[in-house]
Image (cartoon, coloured by chain):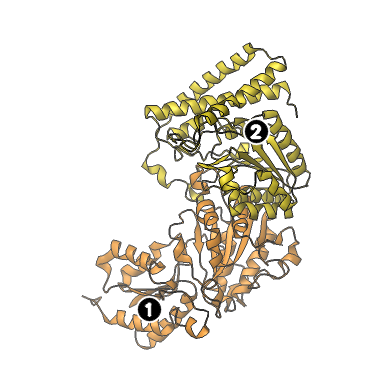
Amino acid sequence: MSERIISYRAALNEALVEEMERDERVFLMGQDVAKFGGVFAVSKGLQDKFGPKRVFDTPISETLIVGGGVGAALAGARPVVELQYADFALVAMDEILNKAAKWRYMHGNRQSVPLVIRAAEGMFGGLGPEHSQSFGQYFWNAFGLKTLMPSTPADAKSMLKAAIRDDDPVLFLENKALYNRRGPVPDEVEVDPIGKASTIRNGTDLTIIAWSSMVAVALKAAEALAEEGISAEVIDPRGVRPLDTATIFNSVDRIGRVLVTHEGPVTGGLAGELIAQIVETRFDKLLAPPARVAGADTYVPQNLELERFIVPHLEHILAAARKLAATGKSSTQ
Amino acid sequence: MEMTVDQLLHAFRIMERSILAEQRLLRFIEAGDSRVLLHSGRGQEAIGIGACAALRDDDMLFYSHRGVAQILAKGILLDELIGDFLGRIGGATGGLGAGIVHAVDPKFGVMGSSGTLGGGFVLSAGAALGAAKLGDDRVSIHLFGEGSANRGTFHEAANAAALWKLPMIWLCENNGYSVSVPHREATCIEDVAQRAQAYDMPSAIVDGQDVEAVYGAVKEAVERARSGCGPTLIEAKTFRIRGHYEGDPQNYRSKDEIAAAKLKDPQILVQERLAARGVGEDRLEAIRQEERAHLEAAVATAMSHAKAGEAQIYQGLLAGDMS
């Protein structure tokens, strides 16, 4: 199948265009999404293509953006709403957690909320503590919400298309550090059902589970480790809920050493919960204590000199991986 | 605006149904058959009933937490409502509710309710937006207390609704209390409807005990919304006859005030209106009998379903669970 090399941003734009062409019920609203084309230029050209009825700006009103999206979805539309920065989700948390996520459940499973909430998360160029957070871990307990975090242009496109077609509300966390990242995207994207982890590299000595921007770092680490004779498997869960524990557990069972990495703070993070599940259910398969390589337990300073200390780097993963590979029981015993 | 005699009779019937249902729920609570949290709508029934008389089945209702009369007027089945309070799987939420109702019925446009007060403004505006985007002529209506109107969501939704001329009606039930706090201690203006000016939105203040007055105001607002002229804010002045919840000591208001509220019972007014239109007491008594029988049948139907069990707690989290 033929493919093109395009950016994560362009892939998202294509997904929006294709889904709006496919389904007239789909519309896009948010702050600056129309003429301006989105603060990260994801919706560029969409208003020209689809007109102001389907692509339009909102007031700076996050509860209206998300809650309005929930209401429109209940009425039968398929809204895609943009929150600009994922940090702004905090302004609309009642609408996300109490309304979008719970509406089906608390009203007896008789209505769907086919809403996509797009938001840009992660550190990018000194935006400071209220515009730089990595958010997935806040949504472990949003049981009625699907929380996705694509790490490549191909995933960005196929996962956004899947999110728009899904009958459940989806929080779609785009990573600011990835917007300019280029990669192969098939001309005909396959829209997989949501919730399948992606095994990007096979290995035998340790499993690296990486989310969002850390996936590319993990792959670089795996290449460097290979030269040292350490074979790392790399798995991208591609989201928080639903979590494909089958793929992850299968890898852990085969390999016995696991390193988990993500951008958000290490405490209460994605890694902590996943490792708890691993230790609880397959302690006997582990050859060494699992490792976490995640964000610092602090806020993101605006100072660029300091910002770089927040999120893990290649060296952190390499150091943790080498230590992990060298400790614990031998797999042959 | 006058309702036809048939409309008034229907309003009387739904009011009777709602009052009987609430009375029965109180008996369940007293007998220990139902351990639920009920926010009685006693005294405020004319608002939801008058409003629903001006709506089509496919218009979308986001009701308040005193919404028993509202959702019965819109079409929710009584046995499903009772079933929920009794925690039965035949209940509107499959028995999850058992208290503050979250009953929905999409075929009657009963869309649900926000448990967090003030959560409904942005949702009802969104539903109106959805209808507009889909190009149909449904309207969205939200009933809410004056206390909820102090949430910031009111402003975000009102601004957007007026800006986009959304087909929606906001119907404020001003019963004078935010739970226990008197209106004058929680709100800087006397009339919530005054806020409509800030959004260049038409508004009206009506007697919330008068089903015909509410009907007339809502009918006008619906016509405006359906013809693309945007939202309306209606404030219905009303009285809460019972506490905020069952068991509320109501130490924040006098017995005289409660007694005065009982004199403003909308059921008394609707009966007077029917009498003035020449409808005999025998006809009303026949409706009362029918509604008592209807309630007993609904209770029996509700009780015929099993109690919700542990398996129910994971049902309906995601679309794959759609029954």
Q: Quadrant of the C terminus of chain A?
A: bottom left
> Visible in this render: residue B208?
yes
Q: Is residue A65 above or below residue A84?
A: above
Q: Which mark is residue A249?
A: none
Residue bearing mark 1: A232
Q: Horizontal and vertical percent for residue B21?
A: 51, 27
Q: Position of residue A306 (x, y in %)?
A: 48, 83
Residue furthest left in the image = A333
Residue on which disc 2 sits: B208
Residue A331 relative to residue B222: left or right: left
Q: Amino acid at mark 2?
A: Gly
Q: Quadrant of the N terminus of chain A?
A: bottom right
Depth check: B67 or A78 in front?
Answer: B67
Vertical relation: B69 (above or below) A315: above
As drawn, A311 above or below B293: below
Helix, strand or loop at mark 2: loop
Give the class, few, some or many, for how many residues have Cα within 10 Å of label 1's Cα (few <14, many ≥20): many
The percent position of residue A18, horizontal first and vertical second, equals 66, 64
- Which-is-in-front pick, marks 2 and 1? 2
Residue A235: quadrant of the picture: bottom left
Q: Quadrant of residue B238?
A: top right
Q: Position of residue B305 (x, y in %)?
A: 43, 30
Q: Chain of mark 1?
A: A
Identity, as a three-letter code, of the amino acid under mark 1: Ala
Mark pair 2, 1: CA separation: 70 Å
Q: Secondary structure at mark 1?
A: strand
Label the orange chain with its letter: A
Q: Which chain is yellow?
A: B
- Is A22 or A298 nearer to us in this picture? A298
User: On what subunit does the disc labeled 2 rest?
Assistant: B
